[in-house]
Image (cartoon, rainbow, N blue to C red):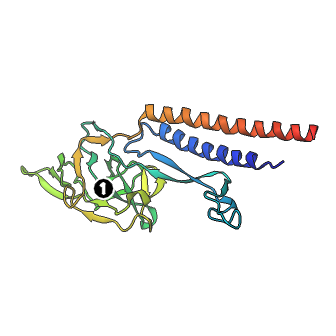
Amino acid sequence: MSSAAMHIARTGLDAQDMRMRVISNNLANVNTTAFKKDRASFATLSYQTVTAAGAQSSSESKYATGLNLGTGVRIQGTARMDTQGSMQTTGNSLDLAIDGDGYFQVQMPGGQTGYTRAGNFSRSPEGQLITSEGYQVMPGITVPEGATQITIGTDGTVSATVAGQTEPSVLGQLQVATFPNPGGLQSKGDNYLLETAASGAASVGTPGEAGHGQIRQGMLEASNVNVVEELVDMIECQRAYEVNSKMISSTDDMLKYVNQNL
């Protein structure tokens, strides 16, 4: 008796285990600034064709449907869901959120450009606008020592009142990067994404223009994880895992019966 059913059920266990990891990561990042949840996609493994549809069943007739046996399932990939998270007001002048499409640009170690929607920025000792890890936000913005009333407009224009002046001075302008396929960006960790061949080249532009999202000062984008949805998916995943486990047990019992009685 074939144990193919046991091996098929094993692929189901592996796939559901990986899906549970995706769900667990989503739930773990429910409070991560601007986190985008992932969704696991499944695909069938190759089929074994026992009888091809349209093959001759006799000299005068053909099979209408054929006989194809599946060999299991696998995780085809994970897709990042780039839906907008809710805006949370913080009141911090250096907390920024993107309302719409796009990413902030960050100078990563080694000169590589990283992209993020987490706008919880601060100032370095030299006055540069930096991320929590100390990476410089691009284009570089330097806030002079003693500057007050830092204002960042929806178009990314950064201005502040400098000591000795009555009128605010423009310090620079932030830009936003968009991609033809943002789902193709590679997750780096620490809320950073990297450009890949699948994402296409970055299109950098002024916030609020040509499809680039606007910047909201004093706000942060929350994670787009819906806890209720993830819990429902977790229960569904658990049940699917249990069913595949029972399939292995049932197949094992059938094999035992054959060995002991035939």
Residue sticking out furthest to the left? 166
Task: Residue under label 1, please give it.
Answer: 102
| The one of 138 and 175 positioned closer to us in this rendering | 175
Q: Which quadrant holds the C terminus?
A: top right
Amino acid type at image mark 1? Gly
Residue 114 is situated, as x and y percent measured from the top left of the image, at 40, 60
Look at 32% across and 55% down and name the residue there.
Answer: 104
Look at 87% across and 38% down and name the residue there.
Answer: 256
Look at 53% across and 44% down and name the residue there.
Answer: 22
Residue 197 is situated, as x and y percent measured from the top left of the image, at 44, 68
Q: Residues within 10 Å of mark 1 (few under 14, many from 20)?
A: many
Instruction: Give the structural element (helix, strand or loop) at label 1.
Output: loop
| The one of 13 and 204 positioned closer to us in this rendering | 13
- State the count of labels: 1
In-image side of 42 versus 180 (left or right): right
Vertical relation: 177 (above or below) 20: below
- Quarter holding residue 202: bottom left
- Quarter holding residue 224: top left
Residue 260 is situated, as x and y percent measured from the top left of the image, at 93, 37
Residue 109 is situated, as x and y percent measured from the top left of the image, at 45, 62
Vertical relation: 179 (above or below) 158: below
Look at 41% across and 48% down and name the residue there.
Answer: 81
| The one of 27 and 242 positioned closer to us in this rendering | 242
- Quarter holding residue 227: top left
